[in-house]
Every structure is written in C-alpha cells, then in structure tokens.
Image (cartoon, helix red, strand yellow):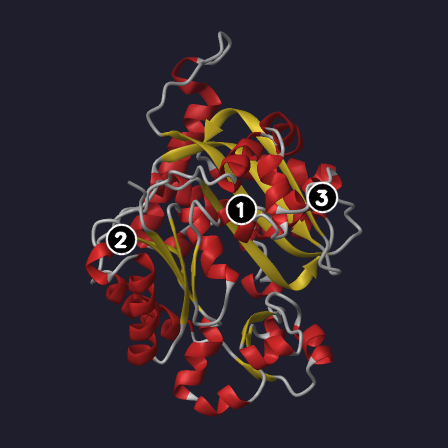
C-alpha cells in the first residue's frame, strides 16, 4: 500500500504573520526585508500584491522598489515567526507523530495510518488548511502524494490556500512539463548545467539516462533521476527526531568590504573559530573545507579542498580555508561576504590511517589537539571571549563585522 504524505507550506509566511498584527498591510504591496544599514537589504518575503508587481524573494530592496515604488517595507520579527511555527506544527501533531520540519514555514506529515479516518489524504489536507486559516489567520498550501518529493512539488504547484494531489496516475502529466529548476534540490548551478545538456523540464530529467546525469552532476544525478521518476522512499521523521549534521558552516556579511590579506585572514579566523567549536561540540571531524566569496557586485565563487586527514582543529580549518582564498582571489578586489564550511564527516572515534613517518604520540597534531582542548576548557569555564586568537585581538570587532 502506498504511503500518504502531506507537505504543508505556509503562504508568504513572514509577510502573512506581519499582517496579523497589522491588517492594514493586507491592502498594500508589502515586503519583509533585512536592514539596509547593516547591508542585509534584501527581500525576505512579500505579500500577493507585491508578488503581482514582480517583487521576488532574495532580490535587493532597490530592485524591488524599482518594480513597485509604493512597496511598504517591514523589518522582520523573528521571534513571532518561530512562535507561530511552533503552534502550527503542534496542530499537525494532533493528526500524526510523524511531522518533519523542512523549514520554519514548511513541514512534511506522514498520515498513512490515519488518513482514512478523515476521508483520505486530500480531505485531511483540506481540514488542515481550514484549521490553520481559522485558528491562526494564516493560509497554507498542501501537496498530497505517495512520497516526500512529490508532496513538496504538489504544495508548490498551486498557491495560495490550495491542495494539489500528485498520484501515480497523474504525476507525469502534472509534473513533467515543469521547469527542471522546480525539482527539489536542483539549484541554479545544477539547473544551468542541465540546461546546457538540453535538459529543461522535470520530464527531460526523468527520461535522461542515469549515466548521462551522473556525467553532468556527479552522484547527485542518480538521486535526481530517482526523484523525477517518483522513486523517493525517504521516511518522514518523527517529532523530535533529527539527522546528524551533514555540514557545518558560518558566514559573515561585513559592515565594510574586506580588502587585502590581513582583512581576509581576520575574517577567516572568525569563521574558523565558530566552525571548529561546533565540530568539537558535535564530536565529529571533517575532511573537506569549503569557502564561498561574494564580491561587491554580488558575484559568488565557491572553492573546496579535501584534506589528507579529518580534523576538528580551528588551526587546520583556518589554514586550509586561507590557502583556498589566496589561490582563488585577487587581493586588490574587495570582499562583501565570506562563508566557511566543512563537510565529509567522520566520528570522533573513527580509526585513522597513520603514516610511517608520523611522530609517536601524534607529534605536532597531538600537541595541537591538546592545546585546542585546553582553549575549549577555558572558554567553557570563563566564557567564549575569555581567550581568543591574537589575530582577532589585534582587531576591534566592530572594525569589520
């Protein structure tokens, strides 16, 4: 028997929540945006009237204002968004214990065991839409399908306040004409690579050979081929159940542009301290370091390097990241944003292949681990700012952050 999976997506969530306390905003084109003064001036969410004017999420405020001069801008109220998220997911939990959050405004529900009590998956989705509307003055769009990927595509198919059923009988008719960019986990770069290979729709993706997709996208090509053909079998997690972290990253959009090696070193050290601390807290080590650089024209480049051994040491992460940036970036070009992340994890106790030439007792690596452990102990006892890299002490925090 097929599963019954729902994907529930709150419509224009941030903007809709703002309209609860300020109903007058429903009558004008409005958008929730970041703070332009701290250089986070992008559109985070918009209402339907702004959408009709062509305003899109993630574009800059000045771009949105050019399309819609009378656009009303509202700062985000993040605590309020989290509070409504908790209430809505508590409502979902009245119907099933398998409620998996995909983001602050999206959740999957596995209602296989109880859907028949409400007349089937569609009837249950309609019931949830009604209750969210009546109890919270918000609307959701719901997708109903036999797997998570198609349920997500169903909730995206028709908005706002709609239910779309994607079945084994209709998924080719419904989904195959959609742009390949609409497929879950196909980002802009992957979409461009697929388009260059004359793969423009989800149907093209489904009908391409696995070998061809793997040649274009690597291992993810096989996964996307399965998704497009309705072969996703991933379970909906139970409430409170989480996967171990697959990546750890941090990024900073700086108050002023970084220029030159000294600025870059300082920015990377801030990020490496954060990422290294989180690795050690999770008791994992990473083999691959990734950096992302955004310039003042919002152009982004990404680079990564896999190290010989997995590490959780701030020093190793910093040095690898610095090498990547120095090899990839002209130092006379200003940097607006730096991102540093790590992937390819190994458990803390995983066996390590040592070299014949390694020093007994771990040598320099062992001393580095002892030093890092001592630093972590001091911070745990006296606070995060009690001990810091000399490079960071040389800079006033407000100088670049």
Q: Disc 3 on helix, strand or loop?
A: helix
Answer yes or no: do the residues labelled 2 and 1 have beta carbons within 8 Å? no
Which one is nearer the viewer's eye here, 112 or 341?
112
Q: Quadrant of the C terminus?
A: bottom right
Inspect this view and state whether residue 207 appears. yes
Identify which residue is drawn at 71% across, 73% down: 63
Residue occupying the point 34% across, 46% down: 378
Q: x, y percentage for residue 106?
A: 40, 60
Judge depth for marks 3 and 2 and give the one in front: 2
Pointer 1: residues within 10 angstroms few (<14), some, or many (20+)? some
First in sequence: mark 1 or mark 3?
Answer: 1
In the rendered image, the residue lying farthest to the top is 356
- Residue under numbered circle 2: 111
Name the residue beneath numbered marker 1: 172
Q: Residue 146 bears which disc, if any? A: none
Name the N-terminal-most of marks 2 and 1.
2
- Characterize the local packing of mark 3: few (<14), some (14-19) or many (20 or more) Cα atoms within 10 angstroms: some
Establish if 75 lies above or below 197: below
**Dot 3 corresponds to which residue?**
195
Q: Categorize mark 2 by other alpha carbons within 10 Å: few (<14), some (14-19), many (20+).
A: many
SS for tag 2? loop
Are discs 1 and 3 less than 8 Å apart at CB? Answer: no
Separation of marks 1 and 3 at Cα, in angstroms: 20 Å
Query: Please, which residue is most extreme toward the bottom here?
Result: 24
Report how far apart the C-alphas of labels 3 and 2 lie in the structure.
36 Å
């Amino acid at each position: 028997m097929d599963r019954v999976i729902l994907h529930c997506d709150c419509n224009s969530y941030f903007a809709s929540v703002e309209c609860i306390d300020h109903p007058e905003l429903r009558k004008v084109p409005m958008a929730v945006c970041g703070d332009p003064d701290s250089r986070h001036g992008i559109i985070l969410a918009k209402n339907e009237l702004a959408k009709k004017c062509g305003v899109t999420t993630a574009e800059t405020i000045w771009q949105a204002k050019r399309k819609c001069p009378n656009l009303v801008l509202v700062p985000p109220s993040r605590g309020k968004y989290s509070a409504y998220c908790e209430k809505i997911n508590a409502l979902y939990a009245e119907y099933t214990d398998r409620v998996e959050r995909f983001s602050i405004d999206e959740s999957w529900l596995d209602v296989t065991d109880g859907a028949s009590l409400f007349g089937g998956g569609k009837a249950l989705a309609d019931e949830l839409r009604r209750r969210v509307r009546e109890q919270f003055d918000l609307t959701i769009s719901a997708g109903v399908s036999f797997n998570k990927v198609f349920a997500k595509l169903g909730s995206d198919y028709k908005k706002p306040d709609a239910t779309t059923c994607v079945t084994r009988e209709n998924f080719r008719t419904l989904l195959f004409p959609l742009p390949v960019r609409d497929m879950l986990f196909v980002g802009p770069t992957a979409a461009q690579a697929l388009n260059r290979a004359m793969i423009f729709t989800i149907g093209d993706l489904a009908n391409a050979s696995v070998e061809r997709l793997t040649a274009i996208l690597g291992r993810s090509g096989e996964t996307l081929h399965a998704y497009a053909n309705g072969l996703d079998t991933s379970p909906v997690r139970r409430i409170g159940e989480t996967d171990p972290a697959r990546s750890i990253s941090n990024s900073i959009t700086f108050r002023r542009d970084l220029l030159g090696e000294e600025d870059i070193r300082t920015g990377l050290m801030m990020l490496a301290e954060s990422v290294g601390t989180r690795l050690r807290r999770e008791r994992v080590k990473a083999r691959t370091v990734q950096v992302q650089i955004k310039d003042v024209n919002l152009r982004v480049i990404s680079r990564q390097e896999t190290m010989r051994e997995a590490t959780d040491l701030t020093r190793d992460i910093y040095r690898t990241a610095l090498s990547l940036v120095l090899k990839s970036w002209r130092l006379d070009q200003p940097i607006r944003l730096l991102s540093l992340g790590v992937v390819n994890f190994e458990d803390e106790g995983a066996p390590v292949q040592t070299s014949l030439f390694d020093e007994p007792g771990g040598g320099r690596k062992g001393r580095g681990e002892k030093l890092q452990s001592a630093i972590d102990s001091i911070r745990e006892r006296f606070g995060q700012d009690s001990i810091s890299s000399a490079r960071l002490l040389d800079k006033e925090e407000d100088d670049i952050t």
